[in-house]
Image (cartoon, coloured by chain):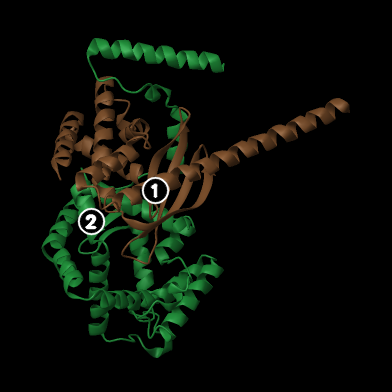
Chain colours: A brown, B green
Amino acid sequence: MKKFLAAAILVLFSSSAALAQSASQSEQAKVFINDIGNKIIKTADDKKSSVEQRKNKIIAIIDGAIDTDWIARFVLGKNYKNTSDENKARFSKLYRDFMINTYGPKFQNYNGRKFDVTDVSEQNSFYIVKAEFLPRDSNTPIDIAFRVKERSGKLMILDFIAEGVSLIETQRSEFNSAISQKGMEKFLEDLEVRIKNLKSQK
Amino acid sequence: MLLASTGFVNTDAFAQIKKARKEKVVFQTPAQTTIAEDDFETYETEQSEEIYDPLEKYNRKIFVFNDAFDRYFLEYVARLYRDKVPKEVRSSTHNFLNNLYLPISVFNSLAQGKVENGLATFSNFLINTTLGIGGLFDVAGNRGLKYNYEDFGQTLGHYGYSSGAYLMIPFFGPSSTRDLTGTAVNNAINPIGFNLLEVGGQDKLLKTEYLIAINVTSGIDQREGLIDIVDDLRKDSFDFYATIRSAYLQKRQAEIKN
C-alpha cells in the first residue's frame, strides 16, 4: 500500500512537473515572439536610422530567429531525396540568403502601432503563437501566427501563417513546381540571381 | 540511449566537416544534422490535403490569360480606384457590398450547425443595415461584433467533401470543383441575386443591370484590397501559378476548419 502511495505521489509530482515545464515553455514561446515582433516594429519606426541601417538591423533580428536550415529541408519536400548532398548544402545556404534579403526590406514597412501575442497553443511538437499586428495607418488589426519550436536549446521560428496560409507550405509547393519544370540546377541558378538582385536593391 | 544518440550526432557532424573540407563545399551549421525526420512528418500530416490539379495544362493557359487581363485592365482599374476615390467612399462601398452577402453567410452558418456564428452574422447584418444605413457603415464590426464568413463551398467542405480538382476560371481566378458548385448554390440562394428559387413569386428582385453593377464593383473592390499582396507575390514567386494554387487551397481549408 505504501509502495502504491509512493508511486502515486511520484506520478502526480512528475506529471505536474511536466505540466509546469510545458507551461513555462509556452510562456517562453510567447515572450520570444512578443520580443521579436516588437523589435521589428520599433526598428521599422526608427526614423533616425537610414533605410540601409534599418534593413540591416531587421535582417540581424530575423536571421537569428528563423531556423532556415529546417525550413530549407522542409521546402525541398519530395525533391529532398533526389538532391545531391552538395546541392542540399548549396540550397540551404541560398535559402537563408533569400529569406533574410526578401523579408529584411519587407518588414521595414511594418511600422505598426502595436504588436501583441494573443494566444499560445501546443500542436504536436510545435507551439502555435498567434499575434495581432496593428499597422500605423489602419484600425483593423492583422492576425498572424508563428510556428515555434525549441531547436538545439533555443526557440526558433519555423513558419509564418497569415489568413490560414503557411509561408513554408506555399514555398514548398512553389519551389517543387519550379524545380520539376526547370530542374534543380537551373532553379538554384535562378535563386542566386534573385538574391543578387535583392541585395543590390536599395 | 541519450548519450548514444548525442554521440551519434557528434560523429555525424564531425564526418560532415571532414567531407565538407574534402569536397570544398560550404559547411552547414551542425544543427542541420540533428533535424529529426518525424518533425517533418508531424508537420505534413497537419497540413492541407494533397494538391489535385489534373487540368493543370489548361489551368495554366487560363492563368496566363487572367494574368494578362489583370495586368492590362483589372489592376489598372483597381489602382485608379485606389488613387482617385477617397478612402471613406471606398470603405463604405466595401461595407455595403460585404453586407449584401451576409444573408448567404447566415444560411451557410446554420447549414453547418454553427448557430452562434449564424446569429452573430445575422445581428451584424441587422445592425449594419439599419444603424449602418443600408450597410454603408460597419457599426457592428467597429463595436467588436465578430463573425466568420461562410459560403456553400465551405458547407460542402464541412460535410467532408474534398476540394476536388483545382480550377482556374477565366476572369474570376482560382476555384475548385467543390467551390464552383458552392458559388452556383450561393447565387441560387442569394436573395438579391438570381433567386432561382423564385421566393415570393419573383424570379429577379433586382434588374440585371444592377446585378452586373454590383458584381463589377465587387470585383474592383476585391482587387483593390489585393493590390499589395499580388504585387509581392508576382515579384517574389518562382512559379506564380503554383503559389496562387497553394495559397488558395490552404486558405479555403482554413476557412472550412474555422
Q: Quadrant of the C terminus of chain A?
A: top left
Name the spot of residue B44 as percent of width and height, x first. Answer: 42, 39
Name the spot of residue B71 as percent of width and height, x first. Answer: 13, 60
Name the spot of residue B80 as percent of width and height, x first. Answer: 15, 70
Quadrant housing residue B21? top left
- In the picture shown, does residue B122 fall above or below A100? below
Chain letter of disc 1? Answer: A
Quadrant housing residue B79? bottom left
Question: Which residue occupies 40% across, 57% down?
Answer: A114
- In the picture shown, does residue B83 fall above or below A94? below
Residue B253 lies left or right of residue B80; in this view the side is right
Name the spot of residue A64 as percent of width and height, x first. Answer: 36, 34
Residue B28 lies left or right of residue B58; in this view the side is right
- Residue contact between numbered discs 2 and 1, judged by CB atoms under 8 Å: no
User: Is residue A17 visible in this depiction of the protein?
Assistant: yes
Separation of residues labelled 2 and 1 (CA atoms): 24 Å
Dot 1 falls on a residue whose secondary structure is helix
Give the residue type that dot 1 points to: Gly
Q: Nearer the viewer, residue B174 or A189?
A: A189
Give the residue type that dot 2 points to: Val
The crowding category of the residue bearing disc 2, from other C-alpha atoms within 10 Å (few below 14, some 14 to 19, many at least 20), is some
Q: Nearer the viewer, residue B16 or B213?
A: B16
Residue topped by disc 2: B230
Residue topped by disc 1: A37
Question: Which residue occupies 57% across, 16% down?
Answer: B1
Quadrant housing residue B104? bottom left
- In the picture shown, does residue B117 fall above or below B26? below
